[in-house]
Amino acid sequence: MNVSLAFRPRLLDALRTYSRADFRADLVAGLTVGIVALPLAMAFGIASGVTPAAGLYTAVVAGFLISALGGTKVCIGGPTGAFIAILYGIHQHYGPVNAAVCTMMAGVMLVAMGWAKLGTLIKFIPFPVTMGFTSGIAVVILSTQVKDFLGLQLPADAGEVPAEFVKKLVFLGRHIDATHGATLALAAGAFAIVRWWPARLARVVPGSIVALVAGTALVMGFHGDTAWGVATIGTKFGGIPQGLPVLAWPEIHWLELPSLFRPALTIALLAAIESLLCAVVADGMVEDRHDSNQELVAQGIANIVSPLCGGIAATGAIARTATNVKNGARTPVAGVIHAAVLLLILFAAAPLAKHIPLAVLSAVLVNVALNMGEWHHFARLRKWPKSDVSVFLTAFALTIVVDLAVAVEFGILLSALTFIKRMADQTKVDASFELSDEELKAQSQTGREVPRGVMVYRLFGAFFFGAADKLETALMSAQQLPEVLILRLREVVAIDATGINALEDMHEKLRKKGKHLILCGPHTQPLFALDNAGFLDAVGRDNVCADMETSLARARELLAKPARQRS
């Protein structure tokens, strides 16, 4: 593994040729995406089991660090919907302090991944896995918003809404009769505004901001929090403090760190996947090429610092990145401006935040979940290979019913097994003897005739642990071993230790009976692998031939020798 401590944020490259025109474009984009991020950050904070202030702190601190230190030009970082299910569960099971420690551990893992240049490995996570757990996360987000969207008036002894999906559905179903009419009406109205706000107007002001301002004004004007009983940030959280909190190191319980490793790894993997997916999307929109390892380092630093400022886990936000690009962003400066806008709002408008209805933020998140789910892929499942369908549905179901860590683990495992099976199915052992057109032209008529006592087997594909038994099965069907066995390897693209071991067993079986093995035309990788394993010396280098005519000539030489000499 090639480890490098190279550290070069894209911001440095951008500032070399930065112009006033670039700044004007970045300023407009940064202002717009900062406003768009405001309701999302608060909503993500609440849905993750913390305060809306924590979501804003994350958007400011992590958003700044990801843009300033990252490996992309226009990506926006901050809290995202992908983390809601994980963080809510971690807060319930381990507590807020350990949740902060988990996020910092994930940050260290991300930095290590970036320095070890593992950024490119994320592309090996199969598409059905990422789409499966993304759709599963969307369902989980929807389930977390039922309480605030309906305004359920829970009795004091009801307790918290469970983190587990099935228990959550049972809990919500048991209290569905406690729906609050005014809250539901406010949430439905806000959702309608966000969902169907005209695209031409969205360029001027986003629908989520319109819903936020309208809902807040309605509650303030009619004293909805007291007269109607509508829950607001003020009634539940006491409001949002002005400015950023003082840096505070979380209390680390060293004996509990081993139990935090798995959730921390889940956060790190999801942050890596989401951020690099976001970077790929951004590359396609601005025709750029990101530095995946630099991006992972920036994500790691952001996730280390964010909890110190009262924030939560962060990663690349695809929707906000798209908004950034559509509004003309050219460099990472736009992301820095977006963070500055949110910080300015924290200082100037925090007192007003206490009037924001939770129902409006819930409506924003419901819209996020509906946009996030890859629902169109369900209609395409009947056209996919069955193995991919099983991977997609497994990742989807496990994300909902168990958790994201299990979904990713089983999804990747199942994908690996199906890939191995596909490769094994492509590997064939054929006893027929056919020459290519080139060989037919180059060889004499005699060179094309297979002598009596010689058997030719052609191997196709990768000769590895998933298919090594096919050679033995083919020979067993012949019932009797030939005097000389020629293995034609010109179409074997790769071989592993299991394949080498199968050849060694076959050679030993032939040798004990005074028979011979000839290898015909092995490619570079199989040739070097067999040589390094010492197999070429065991077979005899005279029995490794370049083409079929040479192999058949060698077979005739071996057949011409007396039996004692051949053995």
Image: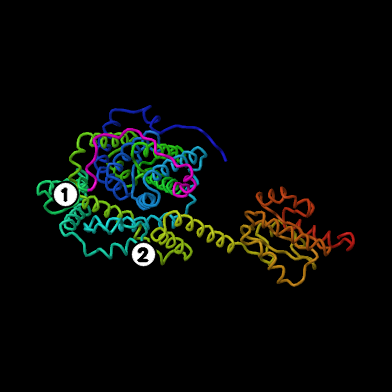
Cα distance, mark 1 to mark 2? Answer: 36 Å
Q: Position of residue 436 (x, y in %)?
A: 66, 60
Give x and y (percent) for residue 215. Answer: 16, 49
The span shown in magenta is 236-264
Residue drawn at the location 68% of the way across and 68% of the way down: 473
Identify the residue under disc 1.
215
407 or 66: which is nearer to us? 407
**Mark 1 burial class by Cα count in 10 Å: few <14, some 14-19, many 20+:** many
Disc number for residue 360: none
Does 89 lie within the magenta span? no
**Circle 1: element type:** helix
Q: Quadrant of residue 37?
A: top left
Q: Nearer the viewer, mark 1 or mark 2?
A: 1
89 over 341 or under it: above or below:
below
Indicate yes or no whether the magenta region holds residue 253.
yes
Q: Which residue is mark 2?
A: 379
Could you tell me which quadrant the N terminus lies in? top right
Q: Using residue 145 as the reference point, say whether residue 511 is left or right of it.
A: right
Left or right: where does residue 160 sit relative to residue 302? left
- Return the residue nearer the eye: 558 or 138: 138
Q: Residues within 10 Å of mark 2 (few under 14, many from 20)?
A: few
Amino acid carrying label 2: it is Ala
* Among the 4 quarters of the image, the one containing residue 305: top left
Asked whether residue 510 is in view, the answer is yes
